[in-house]
Amino acid sequence: MMRYFGWSYAVTLLGLLGAFWLGWSYSGTWSGGMGFLLIGAVLAVLEISLSFDNAIVNANKLNTMDPVWRRRFLTWGILIAVFGMRILFPLMIVVVAAGIGPIEAVRLAATEPARYSQIIHGAHLSIAAFGGAFLMMVALSFFADAEKHVDWIGGVERQLRRMGAVKGAEILLVLVVVGAVSLALPEAQKATFLFAAIAGLGAYLGVALLGQVLDQPQRAGAVAQGGLGAFLYLEVLDASFSFDGVIGAFALTHNLFLIAIGLGIGAMYVRSMTIMLVDRGTLTEFRYLEHGAFWSVLVLSCIMFAQTLVEVPEAVTGLLGAGFIALALASSLRYNRRLAAAG
């Protein structure tokens, strides 16, 4: 376990010490430091629970990825995940929403965290719509694959696989869901929601198209460039998975730097789990684990759409995602036992 999680343990120790120091510097008291340390630990656990399906989906893609680009994703990708999504992304939301400069946004985060959090939550509708559409396409593209031969939830997955025989059927299904949700929104929010959802759908299609262009084996210099499209896809995918964690973190604290520490620790564990899944071939050993992860992704996308209408606690999101993965793991173990008994 130290081979896979050694760096994660080290980052956890440094991160929690940093959280304690941050709380001490703000309050000047032991209790203030311990309060920040505990919140940082809770944020890390929240990120891990929400992102376990992310690790499985990443591992699925990395299994077929060029080894050079696989290493680049596991090194550069984690830097982009931690610093890009956990720090720069919330800052850019404030920059765009408040019409201020990046330096002013950092000052706002450091000196007026409540105002900073208010601006972040004001952009929640667009974030939920974009992430919901993107992640729903990710899940449906897996289930609607006509070449998929293994089904976990047989009746539903077979129907979705048959649907995949119709070109663009998953896109139509996402548009139907987007249209249904928009009808339930107040008139003033419909245009914002529809624009963000279509942007999420367009982002998925654009990244998929770019990946096909960049990763064509017949391209000149394909050995050097192979995997770039998959790298970009995984980065956008990680960003979409991170939306709910970043927004939900503000329910625990308004401090951007504490959020970055807590979610950064969680991101390191997601990286470690991804490496372990790839190295040990866990997805092939457990027949339905991948299916459970994509069902979790589909549920997460539905929750993100639902969050535009009602508030859904982060605990519900995490428990549902973990529940599908746990059930898929149990089904895989039962299948393995039956296979062993049959010789």
Image (cartoon, grey):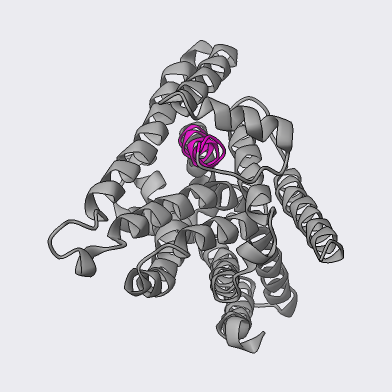
Vertically, is 278 above or below 236? Answer: below
* Relative image position of residue 62 (x, y in whole percent): 46, 64
Q: Residue at x 59, y 74 (%)?
A: 276
Would residue 102 appear left or right of 296 to someone viewing this image? Answer: left
Q: Residue at x 43, y 72 (%)?
A: 74
* Relative image position of residue 152 (x, y in whole percent): 71, 44
- What residue range appears in magenta? 129-146
* Relative image position of residue 155 (x, y in whole percent): 72, 31
Would residue 28 appear left or right of 38 to someone viewing this image? Answer: left
**Residue ranking furthest to the right:** 341
Which of the pair 155/184 is nearer the observer?
Answer: 155
Q: Is residue 59 magenta?
A: no
Which of the pair 110/329 is nearer the observer?
Answer: 329
Would residue 212 appear left or right of 310 to someone viewing this image? Answer: left
**Residue ranking furthest to the front:** 343
| Chief SS of the magenta region | helix
Vertically, is 66 above or below 209? Answer: below
Q: Residue at x 41, y 30 (%)?
A: 196
Which of the pair 187/173 is nearer the observer?
Answer: 173
